[in-house]
Image (cartoon, rainbow, N blue to C red):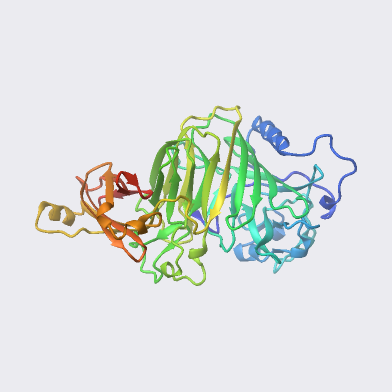
Amino acid sequence: MTELNRRAVVQGLASAALVAGSAEAPARAQEGRPTTPFGFPDVERRAQDLAKLPYDARVPALPAPIAKLDYDAWRDIRFKPDKAFLGEGSPFRLQLFHLGFLYTRPVTVNLVRGGVATPIPYQSSLYDMGRTKLDRALPVDLGFAGLRIHAPLNKPNLLDELIVFLGASYYRFLGRDQLYGLSARGLAVNVEGTAGPEEFPVFREFWVVAPETHADALVIHALLDGPSLTGAFRFTVAPGDETSVAVTATLVPRVDLATVGLAPLTSMFFIGENDRRHTDDYRPELHDSDGLQIAAGSGEWLWRPLDNPRDRRISTFGDRDPKGFGLMQRDRRFESYQDLEASYDRRPGYFVEPEGAWGEGAVMLMELPTDTEVNDNIVACWRPAQAYPAGIPVRLAYRVRAIGDAPLHPGARVVNTFGVAPVASGTAKGAEAKAGLTRRFLVDFAGGDLAYYLPAPDTVEVVAGTSAGRITATSIAPNPHDKGFRAAIDVTLDATGQSADLRVFLRAGGRALSETWVYSWTAP
């Protein structure tokens, strides 16, 4: 996988189906009702039928007026708010993105009313075209680049952007008082690039179900298509403090599929308190997410701080029937970022909670090197242990939550990670430190019951382990600023270039007090 530019995210959308009629057509119920109302089983059947055909990667040429739009000109084309669909008492509004710039593969967007699915035809009158001048009408079967939904998220009398589907199978959504950061995807295929270049399956068609009056959730169906598989998706979007998206999916592999990534998340990490070697920027930290959170099937909670590595790094966390995983933005202090425009302290974390048994597999984390904050260089997903055979549908369900500052578990959690040179002396340890084979990590834990133990720090112990080399020293000190403790761990490796996976948690009287800090370190 190559680095994904935040403005130029790799995307591909299949050809739009022919549509006819006016922009008002979806608002009019067709005469009579279908025997069986349109629903998710219809999308499943389409996915199964589509999987029997070869993948069609052709992209229809855009008409001349919009074929060469740059980013600013494309962004200047605005959907008119008074043309939004889904009014009539519903708290949700549907807007459609115009084709152009990198978004050249059209998608079909349908409205489902009374069980009847009706395509929305393209009309330029839906848009304020900005500086783009049209010398002729564009065809009604032009299609759209994607869609977005507005709803009263932060104030009851104000419509805020709630969720966006734009580019390949990417989507982003917000909880209350949050700003966009990371993205979710419908599916990832061959993220590591071991079986050829990464595939980006696309959502080629959507069905937005008109909600009942005063509904508190919105249902969106989507048809996925890609070289290796097709899929039917149902998204149930429920806005709130932690907006949730319940996902039901049926995947139909075209080929034996061994490199699929389920519930993938994509984010950016440039610099943090644990890694500042890349820049002398005045801003202390620059990231959309600062760690990978895992709720293992065993009940253990893991926290893996993210890194901007020198070379591509892939980490896997084997598990069975995971309870959850996500890319989180844990540091929510403005002082950590000092950015008045980007507001990194308000970026959400996305936490994936599987429904049912997902079996054997691993949470996979890929970190790519980047020299700028505009590249999405982090990917996390679930990798099943067994390949999916061609032609056999795979069904799964999960929920994704937009997390703010609320803790996910009752134990203490990691709030800071620092890597420093250890204090050296004229001993062998000092020589190892000078050679770069020894590193000290300072890990701050806070929350849970740690405040209770502050008056008696001797009752708290550091439990540390490493997959290579050895732990040469540990210590712990009260941290009254966070009402927690700071653990110090010295790690020594045997040779330059050797890597180690480290694990640290706090314990008192045989009882774990914290989540487990996990980290990868390579001796330079």
Q: Which residue corresponds to the image point at 43% horizontal and 36% vertical from the top-left?
A: 319
Q: Which residue corresponds to the image point at 66% horizontal and 29% vertical from the top-left?
A: 52
- Left or right of 522? Residue 390 is right
In this picture, is 50 found above or below 457?
Answer: above
Quarter of the rendering containing residue 420 = bottom left
Quarter of the rendering containing residue 156 = bottom right
Q: Which residue corresponds to the image point at 36% horizontal and 69% vertical from the top-left?
A: 280
Tell which of 523 and 213 is nearer to you. 213
Tell which of 257 and 60 is nearer to you. 257
In this picture, is 339 found above or below 193?
Answer: below
Q: Position of residue 196 (x, y in %)?
A: 47, 38
- Left or right of 224? Residue 515 is left
Q: Position of residue 41 (x, y in %)?
A: 71, 35
Q: How many numbered discs sit on the rendered protein?
A: 0
Tell which of 24 and 445 is nearer to you. 445
Q: Position of residue 351 (x, y in %)?
A: 51, 49
Work out whether residue 168 can be spotted. no
Work out whether residue 351 can be spotted. yes
Q: Position of residue 405 (x, y in %)?
A: 49, 59
